[in-house]
Amino acid sequence: MSTYSRLLELTECLKNINFDIIGLSETRKLGNTIEEHDEFILYYIGDTPGLYGVGFIVKKYLKRYITSFIGLSERVALLRMNIDSLELSIIQVYAPTEASSDEELEFFYSTVDKAIQLSENNIIVMGDFNAKIGQTNPNETVTGNHGYGDRNCRGNRLIDFAHENNFAIMNTFFKKTNKQRWTWRSPNGKIKNEIDYILTNLHRNIYDIQVLNITYPSDHRPVRASLNIVPKTKSRRKFGQCPRFQLKNEEEAETYKQTLNSNLINLLEDRRDEDTVQNYYDDITNAINNSLKKAHEVSSNRNSVKKQVLSARTKALICRRQ
């Protein structure tokens, strides 16, 4: 994306892809800039001419949800958003290649740690990690059952990073064919690896991971995560904690008030000095439950009389016919 023509080419390719936010790795674009285009907002950061660089493309309708763009380095950028009270932080990365030194790699991960410290509780870390996870280990809690290829040393470092931050590597949680898994291929097309990943602590909200085929000239294929932002649902196990008898009408409410008042008066009269706080709590709870139960029984008895289908005269006629 070092030239404007390459940006136009990418924009044309994205017209046939359903997306909201795109993370960019190796943009090779100098500066720390926010550009507003007709259909999207582009943010990028880069320091080295012709190398590295990361950024984001965000659909225009999400502009009101954006809190900030923060470029920590030409390998790590942070996008913070607040979407319907969900504070979401997206970290885009471009990790050093396997040919780089261990010092470079550790400096990269320390920069990612700084981005995490600046993030909210809901975090997505995505991008080109230049690491191969390979086949997963059942003892690893951060990976699923579906790996691709063989693991290398950088893959072990990525696994450790996920463990340290309690992130799930979402690529490994969805069963795909080998053709749908690789994200990078060598210039001769003979070697294909999975080195682009999406990590998050919102693993329950992601319902699919896909590797897409686009006509943009790149040795990488984009990885798309489908994220479902919905309010938290109540667990069905908690429904049983609700009172068994609910007040359904004014009659039950009035009966409940009278019975509860009487029970509480008796409770105060029977108070003893040796009673503990727990005794008081148990007595009050029993008084409330008994009052609810009595109000329900009184209402049920009255409704049972009203709901009789056959009148006394009809019953007498039936007996006479028999």
Image: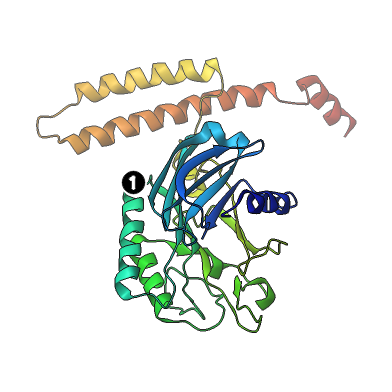
Q: Nearer the viewer, residue 89 or 233?
A: 89
Is there any visible trace of residue 88 in the rendered image? no
Residue 11: x and y, percent?
68, 49
Residue 295: x and y, percent?
48, 24
Q: Nearer the viewer, residue 132 or 277?
A: 132
Q: Amino acid at mark 1?
A: Leu
Q: Would you say 246 lies left or right of 178 here?
A: left
Residue 71: x and y, percent?
40, 48
| Quarter of the figure that contains the C terminus | top right
Q: Is residue 204 above or below residue 320?
A: below
Residue 156: x and y, percent?
39, 77
| Quarter of the figure that contains the N terminus | bottom right
Q: Is residue 10 above or below residue 253?
A: below
Q: Which residue is tagged 1?
A: 118
**Dot 1: within a 10 Å radius of its alpha carbon, few (fewer than 14), some, or many (20 or more) residues?**
few
Which residue: 37% across, 73% down? 157
Q: Would you say 278 lies left or right of 37 here?
A: left
Q: Residue furthest left?
A: 273
SS at circle 1? loop
Q: Is residue 27 above or below residue 175?
A: above
Residue 288, located in which quarter of the rendered image?
top left
Which residue: 38% across, 61% down? 166
